[in-house]
Amino acid sequence: MKKLLLPAAVLALAAFAALPLLRAADHHDKPKRTPSPKGAVSYIVNPADGATVKRKFKVVFGLTGMGICPAGILTADGKPLPDTGHHHLLVDVDQLPPLDTHLAPDQPTRYMHFGKGQTEVMLDLAPGKHTLQLVFADHAHVPHDPPVISKKITVTVVE
């Protein structure tokens, strides 16, 4: 019986010691948000709000007050490049996603991620009305603080 108590005590101590690590890995923990500079603006250059477009059309992203940088790029000392990030395009999304955590993974018909630093995309949407909105995010796909979000625009797609 004494032989079983020592391993059980070691296991219990190891589990207790691991609790802080398990808490840190909890998916409910909010990541640290990168500050955005005052006056930073994200916008859709083209198409214009209210435009009628063909099924395949180009969306051009605009940004002032910050720079474009591919996701995951850090300085030599492991810090994100200041005042930089990359675009995420939301297509037909009624409500913004939570802005204090990582944005949703790429979902080609709703959440489009441009982590290589792209500033435009060719869309192919079904005929009808659609909304487009940009959310600018940091190296870890977390919106800046305060968030840099474009105005939501509406386009009408025709054949």
Image (cartoon, helix red, strand yellow):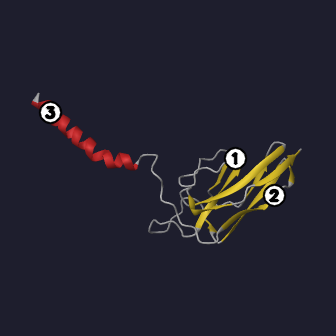
Q: Residue at x 23, y 39 (%)?
A: 12
Circle 3 crowding by C-alpha within 10 Å: few under 14, some 14–19, many from 20 = few
Quadrant placement of the C terminus: top right
Q: How far, Cα to Cα, is label 3 from label 1? A: 58 Å
Quadrant placement of the N terminus: top left
Q: How far, Cα to Cα, is label 3 from label 2? A: 71 Å
Q: Residue at x 48, y 59 (%)?
A: 32
Q: Earlier in the sequence, mark 3 or mark 2?
A: 3
Circle 2 crowding by C-alpha within 10 Å: few under 14, some 14–19, many from 20 = some
Task: Name the disc covering residue 21, or none.
Answer: none
Q: Which residue is mark 3?
A: 5
Q: Earlier in the sequence, mark 2 or mark 1?
A: 2
Circle 1 crowding by C-alpha within 10 Å: few under 14, some 14–19, many from 20 = few
Q: How far, Cα to Cα, is label 2 from label 1? A: 16 Å
Q: Nearer the viewer, residue 13 or 122?
A: 13
Tally of marks: 3
| Mark 3 or mark 2, whichever is nearer to me | 2
Residue 115 x/y as whole percent:
62, 56
- Residue 19 against residue 76 in the figure, above or below: above
Q: Amino acid at mark 3?
A: Leu
Q: Which residue is mark 2?
A: 49
| Mark 3 or mark 1, whichever is nearer to me | 1
Q: Secondary structure at mark 1?
A: loop
Q: Amino acid at mark 1?
A: Asp
- Residue 88 against residue 108 in the figure, above or below: below
Residue 68 x/y as whole percent:
63, 66
Q: Residue at x 85, y 55 (%)?
A: 51
Q: Which residue is mark 1?
A: 94
Outermost residue, front direction?
95
